Amino acid sequence: MISTNPWIWLSAFLSLACFSLFLGDNKAFRWAETTYTASVIGHSTVTGLLVMRDRFYPLYTGAKPILIIPLILGITVLLVVWRKYAWISSIALAVLVGVGTGMSLRTLTSSDIIANTRAVVGEATKIIRGPLTTQVGSIINIIFTISALFYFLFTLFPRGTLSKPLNYLRTLGKYALITYMGISVGNTIQQWVGTATSALYRLIVLWLGLR
Amino acid sequence: MAKMPELKSEHIWIVVTIAFLIPMLRPLNTPFPMSDVTLEIYKIVESLPEGSIVVMGGGGVFAFDIESSPGMISCIKQMARKGIKLIAVPLWSETPQFHKYVIDAARVDKDKYGGPWKYGEDYVLLPYIPGPSDEVVLDSFLRDIHKTVSIDLAGTPIDQLPLMQKVHSYKDISLWFCPHWGFVPVIRIVVAKYNITSISFAQSAAYAFFSPYMYSYPGKVYMTNGYIGGAQYEKLAGDKGLGHMVIDSYTTLSIVTVAVIILGNITMLSRMREEEK
Amino acid sequence: MSRTVTYIRIYLARIIVIVGCLSILAGYFLTSPETAGLSSELQLWSSAISGFTLFIGLITIFARYIRSVMNREQNWPFHLYCLIVIILWVPFGFLQGIYSDIYQTLYLSTKITLHITIIGMMGWFVVSAMYRTFRVRSFRTAVLAILAIAMIFFNAPYLTTPYPVFGDVSYWLLNNPQMSASRAMVICGGIGGVILGIRILLGLERGALRMTGGE
């Protein structure tokens, strides 16, 4: 049976307005788009007000008066919107960039570069023992990782005596990436199917009650 | 071969719509097998002693994170049944709403649904914690929770919540769940630095990016694969939700998608033959 | 503004970047409680400052849309509607609290419904796009198309239930050939990130502090 909940009706009209894009750009879709923009901005503002309450709670209670400094710096960040006064926010942005850069230097090195390189080296031990599928998988892992790395790192291809054999490695790297794209596209289909199912569920089941 | 006409997009959309509507109106209840990694994740949660503190944290966009919701909702029901405690740590601005959504959908709250969990004692929702990057926030949070967060999502000081009085740093956390796109920062800090096992009900597009980390940190990082993994977890928990629905839709859509690709290639071949003639 | 003040501003910002970066690194590599304290304090400050970025969207939209409404530009009725919704939404959300059920219902019924629908529409567009793009014209496109079709089938329950080996093949493909190329991307991304961080520290990336540029 059709729903009597006004929120579900609102949700259904917004969904239908969105789906009207299949018929081309129209005012209903613009209405849905504008509602989306307004809700995003509204929510981030409400969240921002709550964040102010949380982040500066020790300042309000007097437990940590030094937080006045990030409060002032945070207010200067808002001036980034005006080109004439954007320079005032540079100190606050410098704090963000400095802290973020320090963290990324540390984490990227340890978990992205070293841990993954260690994993590739560890694959070598699986080539000589274990089930056949694991052995084949390990060989493919090592070859594809090295060739794809070579393809990325040597975009400007060096010329010389070794250029012909290295060209084969580069081509193998290209196919490793094509393999990646094909498999991930095939795997990602379930994401589009699922999200569309969720969107249709709101209309067909929650609103119209046809199931 | 006669030249095949090029199909218009609108014709394909009509076929796709029918393929979506069939399982929606008449559930197919398609059976599906279990995968080893989903079973292993289930056993990890089952092996946690009562009173263990688990964190559901990370950052993501709600509409994409909906793919992680089937597995997470079933997992919350499992944790509530086992007397495990949960703290929700959102790192993006939309994430508090997603955390509230999955907890409400699991219907575990004592006051609202008569479930086993009481807010403040068994689960806590923390507010969005901003930062220049998720790694900075996670590091600060795990080092000293009470210094990083002062109030919960409702504005109550966390010192007044019984659950938050028991947890102060990474040492008090048994497991970390990340039902979001932002799983990589969790791996970089929670797993790599603080050695806490982390599990993600990963989105299928994200699985491609996260899978190397499963092998970089074996036994510490686990992931399920999209809606299929979520449906498998629902099955283990004895649930039937969005995951099962998507499996039904996938049954029809997979056939339509492959048929469309094959048709496109036949159309191309017929045109090539016509041009040769 | 005088060149001296600009000069001081640029170098002050660069010093703050270096101090921030080194304090985070020192907090990790050194066990001194003072460095840990400084690192932790800077993290809290950066978290507090980041919170203000949530208001930038509000200021930008209001500035742009108020001008549009006053000048009666194209789509000005929609811009006025947007401003009215924001003006109603913010006090409602603040007074009710984002923890409340009513706010959650409002949010799910509007923003989330719209976002899921917009992304869900990709389901239709992806299938029609695949009709046009997955055409085998060369060996490369054949590899791409065959692997995509194989993965679609190997994930399908009507195949994996009677023949579980297809499910194992699907996981093998995901965790071996696909994962290895992804790993290469992660390593290269990591190298790129480290190089960018070093360039920021050396002051070569002025874009990172774009408001300090301006010679």
Image: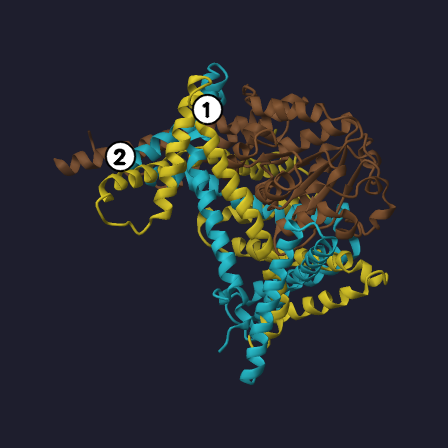
Chain colours: A yellow, B brown, C cyan
Residue C140 position (above or below residue A10)? above
Residue A94 position (above or below residue B104)? below
Side (left or right) of B240 relative to B208 = right
The residue closer to the viewer here, A137 or C125, is A137
**For the view shown, which residue lies furthest in the bottom direction?**
C2
Q: CA distance from mark 2 to mark 1?
A: 31 Å
Q: Chain of mark 2?
A: C
- The three-letter amino acid code for the residue at tag 2 is Phe
The residue closer to the viewer here, A126 or B225, is A126
Instruction: Confirm or deny contact between disc 2 and disc 1 (CB under 8 A).
Output: no
- Picture quarter containing residue B33? top right
Judging by the rendered image, the residue that carries numbered circle 2 is C139
- The three-letter amino acid code for the residue at tag 1 is Lys
Residue B100 at what x, y percent from top left? Answer: 72, 42
Query: What SS does tag 1 mark?
Result: helix
Residue A203 at what x, y percent from top left? Answer: 59, 39
Judging by the rendered image, the residue that carries numbered circle 1 is A126
Q: Chain of mark 1?
A: A
Side (left or right) of B225 relative to B167 = left
